[in-house]
Amino acid sequence: MSSIPPNACRREPTAEPVPSFDETLEHRSLRLVRAKTRTLQVNVGYLCDLLCRHCHLEAGPQRPEVMSGETMDAVVAYASRVRFETIDVTGGAPELVPGIRSLLARLAPLTPRLILRTNLVALREEAASGLMESCREWGVALVASFPSTHASQSDALRGAGFLEKSIEVLRDLHGLGYGSPGSGLTLDLVVNPAGAFLPGNQDQAEKRFKEHLGRQGIQFNRLYSFANAPLGRFRSWLERSGNLEPYFKLLFDRFNPATIEGLMCRSLISVSWDGTLYDCDFNIAAGLPHGSGKRHVSSLQGYPAEGAPIATGNHCYACTAGAGFT
């Protein structure tokens, strides 16, 4: 095994007019290493019913990369021998992946908190028929991507008619008890900016969304505002629109050293659709595996070692700008 530190040989190409992320950490005498791992994130594939402009994975209807039943078995086996406080299932649109219902049913008893990330409209697809009701039965927390309460902004990111369809799904979820006080069924919303800028104040955005959706009889628990990672389809859009360099400059200028300690990659291990381990979902898109080389989830017997370095690239600036991505 090579003695070269993992980050030294696996940096993302940097055509951006900013120092590398590692150089910024070094300049500020900061280290990004693993703390205790509390969350197992499972990316079940890039299949999706949408072609969102801000997608860091370039997920879409034609993507063939989905988690096999064998890899799902390996994920369940790992979650059985190493208990996590949270298991977070994501994609793509995980609702559309064959076998997702069985995976969720087997993971639910293994963790106090099982999360399913959704774009909402995928829950109306035939492949996801009955999944909302099953999630209620298993107590699955839902984290829904919901870019805006304005049709023009939502449809620009997600396609024509997205807002109207997603409101209908939110009403369905409300009818099942999601987001209602005392139900125990958590519904959180995630907002990403529509362009090459940073999100606004999260608390103010949550207040606006609760007022707007409340008038339509819809409730939710929390809203989170996160910057877009300059990867995948979003990076391609930045390049085409001439915004790549200005966006990286913006992220660099807003670098907040106080975010480092709480970054999700310090307490999370991510499993890609093929079973490869990563430090976060963004590193899946960047092709930066966990550790010194590709390693399969079936090979990991315990938690990742505390103090181990985390693979980084300049996309990490998106998680450390402003209030950060924690």
Image: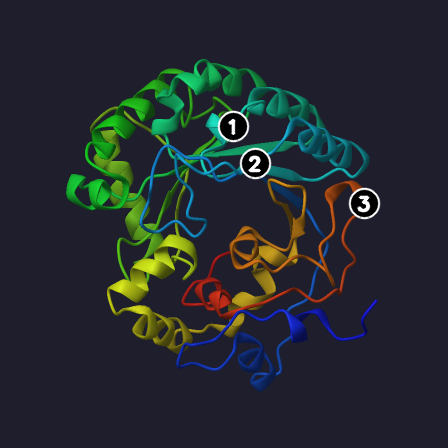
The 10 Å Cα crowd at callout 3, few under 14, some 14 to 19, many 20 or more, is: few
User: Which sits in the foreground, 260 or 80?
Assistant: 80
Image location of residue 249, percent across then percent down:
36, 76
Do callouts 1 and 3 mark residues in contact (Cβ within 8 Å)? no
Residue 73 falls in image quadrant: top right
The residue where tag 3 is placed is 299
User: Is residue 246 in sight in this rendering?
Assistant: yes
Q: Residue at x 58, y 67 (%)?
A: 312
The 10 Å Cα crowd at callout 1, few under 14, some 14 to 19, many 20 or more, is: many
- Left or right side of 202 for 84: right
Image location of residue 57, percent across then percent down:
46, 49
User: Is residue 197 in sight in this rendering?
Assistant: no
Badge 3 marks a residue whose secondary structure is helix
Image location of residue 313, percent across then percent down:
54, 68
- Left or right side of 163 for 239: right
Quarter containing the N terminus: bottom right
The residue where tag 1 is placed is 97
First of labels 3, 2 by sequence position: 2
User: Which sits in the foreground, 96 or 213?
Assistant: 96
Instruction: State the scheme by which the image is colored.
Output: rainbow
Badge 2 marks a residue whose secondary structure is loop
- Left or right side of 53 for 281: right
The residue where tag 2 is placed is 44
Q: CA distance from mark 1 to mark 2?
A: 7 Å
- Left or right side of 323 for 158: left
